[in-house]
Amino acid sequence: MAKKKKEQQVEAVGALPENAHILGAGEVVQQRITETMEINFMPYAMSVIMSRAIPEIDGFKPAHRKLLYTMYKMGLLTGARSKSANIVGRTMQLNPHGDAAIYETMVRLSRGYEALLHPFVDSKGNFGKAYSRDMVWAASRYTEAKLDPICSELFAEIDKDTVDFVDNYDSTMQEPTLLPVTFPTILANPTTGIAVGMASSICSFNLRELCETTIALIRDETADPMDTLKAPDFIGGGKLIYDRAAMEEIYRTGRGSFKVRARYAYDKKNNCIDVTEIPPTTTSEAIIEKIIERIKAGSIKEISDIRDETDKSGLKITIDLKRGIDPDKLMQKLYKMTTLEDSFSCNFNVLIAGAPRTLGVADLLLEWIAYRTDCVKRRVFFDLTKAKEKLHLLRGLEKILLDIDKAIKIVRETEEESEVVPNLMIGFRIDEQQAEYVAEIKLRHLNREYILKRLSDLQELEKKVQELEDILASKSKVRRILVDELRRVSQKYGKDRRTEILYEVELAEEEHVEEVPVYPVTLFFTEQGYFKKITPQSLRMSAEHKLKEGDRILRAVETDNRAELLFFTNRQQVYKSRACDFDDTKASVLGDYVASKLQMDDGEVPLYMAVTSDYGGYMLYFFENGKAAKVPLSAFQTKTNRKKLVKAISDKSPVAVFRQIAEDTELVIVSSSGRMLLFATGAIAPKTTKDTAGVAVMTLKKGQRVLEVRDYTQGMFQKPYRYRTKNLPAAGALPSAEDAGEQMSLL
């Protein structure tokens, strides 16, 4: 039945117009996920890895290679510039991925964009800037471009069978699989790419140092690249913070990171800092936004204004300073807080013989040497073949020289044109190629003078053939060719380093300590989470506090402006801050709402404020279930500048009372049943684990809970021994009649 129904569907489909219905459309088909991945996803992933994102040993991705080769075929290596739109349109014959993607590729290779240490496109017009996020390049119809002179090192031998060619996507023309580059472009310019499941991030190196290192490896494969290749070099300059161990790891494995910081100059006349070079991983807009964000958060108070003054002369970020600020100390602070100092992560992932491999500097250069050696051998073999062919033809011509009249007679007396070549072969004992060459000579050239001129370089040609054969047979001669080419490239295109290297001896700088003004203050914290910092003078002028309806002051602490604050919340978290982070205020204002000021989570409110200058003493948590926890305040001290500590309080039971103590003392716990327990905090062992559940202190019956904790003072009870206990936990005692009256007066 199922088969018959299927046949009926096929007949019905056949009766419909073409493309009116697709058999099986809309049906749910069960398929193993592994089959789906293999059939649908794996080809896509392989295409991205092999044909999109990962560079090959010649230093280019397919998109780069297709664009540059198209420009070379357009004659843009030596000719005048052409409109970018024309170049993009022609490139689509090799790269059918849309004009926008091709134009963006050309922009990133251009001199105007300033992303490459050695750009390959000589641009004219607005090509944007790599160091700016908002400076967008002009449309392709407005800009012009040609190949930069250094591209002659990419294409000089491409017509001598040095690399393989393949058909383009529609088999209408051919394109090279690689370019026969005469220097290691793979490390001469930065390259980044994100594929599927892998990525590539290659930094650029100085061309002179790179050529010198490659020459050293050609001569000795065990040479250490660090002896000649000092450190990466970037078009944007900056200062590279040199870490020997980290650099050795990058050179050895191809993975690791290093830091680059901005270069600046202090303008004493205008009291401002001019930043002129930034790390390659950031933009001027990102830096300015981060500084403004820090200023608004109160972390940076030394800056009065910041603006972008970039113009045609180059990048410039101007930072105006407040009076009396040390510019060097401020920059040390900005290096830590912003991307004025940023890390460059290296991942030298390159396609080698069609397979992705992550290689160190030495291994990568050795792979390039092997590739370039093959290119040179193929070029020499090509030249040798051409020289041998020419030599062979000239030797046939040499035989004609012995009797020119005989050659003329053979041609004249041959009745059919097709018989001319065979008759010349028989008459002079030469092969078909030589006979064809002789037969094609014009009649006016069949004279002794012409033939002698052609034969004059016969001896030199024989010498050339011998030299080419010797090169193919000698590894040392091939290596000498590579060395000579690298020296020529280094001398012709080498540039001085742009990125300055800061060695460890130059980094011996004092840890920056923010200058915080010191003066006495009184800190107030209310039940509804408001905070006030008031100076003694302001407090004397007006001591009456303005509070929200139903609010009351929980803590009032006399300290100084350098004090550190810990705010304990209802979400078992602690937020760290400093008194200097809050503005001075007056008693007549509500103050700062702590939850908003410290950007607490939604629904999170502060319950208690601890104040410290040395993290001495203890925090006591009294839970509603009768347990108490004693945690040294030093447990909240962090080496890093963390603002939020999670899981800082146990969540086993709600906290009834927080209490900060400088040293052990005596306290009175009051339960909901009215019982009171007098005990010494020294009886509770301190725990360094912040979220400890504590130990049982007060025994409670079902439905009872801890209400409050009071400081014990001499004379609080008529008979204190009634409320004391030798062992914990204890139930405490109900207050006597005289104590009950006393306690009511305290309330």
Image (spheres, rainbow, N blue to C red):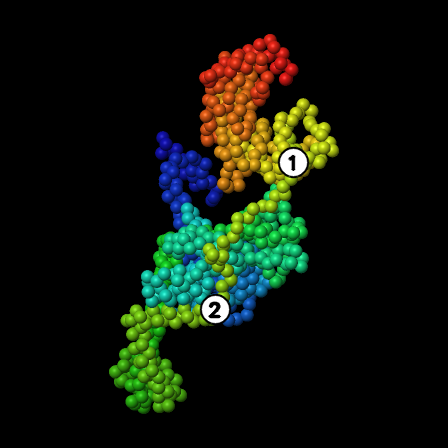
Badge 2 density bin: few <14, some 14–19, many ≥20, Cα 10 Å? few
Query: Which amino acid is tagged 1?
Result: Val
Which numbered mark, 2 or 1, is in the foreground of this view? 1
In the displayed structure, would residue 126 be above or below residue 639?
Answer: below
Dot 2 falls on a residue whose secondary structure is helix
Relative placement, left or right, of 492 versus 546 is left
In the displayed structure, would residue 611 be above or below residue 677?
Answer: below
**Looking at the rendering, which quadrant does residue 420 occupy?**
bottom left
Q: Residue 349 or 591: which is nearer the viewer?
A: 591
Question: Does any portion of residue 312 appear in the rendered image?
Answer: yes
Badge 1 density bin: few <14, some 14–19, many ≥20, Cα 10 Å? many
Q: What residue lies at 40% left-to-right and 36% top-to-bottom?
A: 29
Q: Which residue was labeled with disc 1?
A: 521
Question: Does any portion of residue 74 appear in the rendered image?
Answer: no
Dot 1 falls on a residue whose secondary structure is strand
Q: Position of residue 534 (x, y in %)?
A: 67, 35
Q: Quadrant location of the N terminus? A: top left
Q: What residue lies at 60% left-to-right and 60% top-to-bottom?
A: 314
Label 2 with label 1: CB-CB less than 8 Å: no
- Among the two numbered marks 2 and 1 on one chain, the one whose residue lies closer to the N terminus: 2
In the displayed structure, would residue 342 be above or below residue 535?
Answer: below
Q: Position of residue 353 (x, y in %)?
A: 35, 57
Q: Quadrant location of the C terminus? A: top right
Q: Residue 465 or 485: which is nearer the viewer?
A: 485
Q: Residue 392 or 626: which is nearer the viewer?
A: 626
Q: Which residue was labeled with disc 2?
A: 493
Relative placement, left or right, of 59 versus 654 is left
In the displayed structure, would residue 215 be above or below residue 446?
Answer: above
Q: Residue 126 or 506: which is nearer the viewer?
A: 506
Query: Which amino acid is tagged 2?
Result: Tyr
CA distance separating discs 2 and 1: 65 Å
Relative placement, left or right, of 744 versus 256 is right
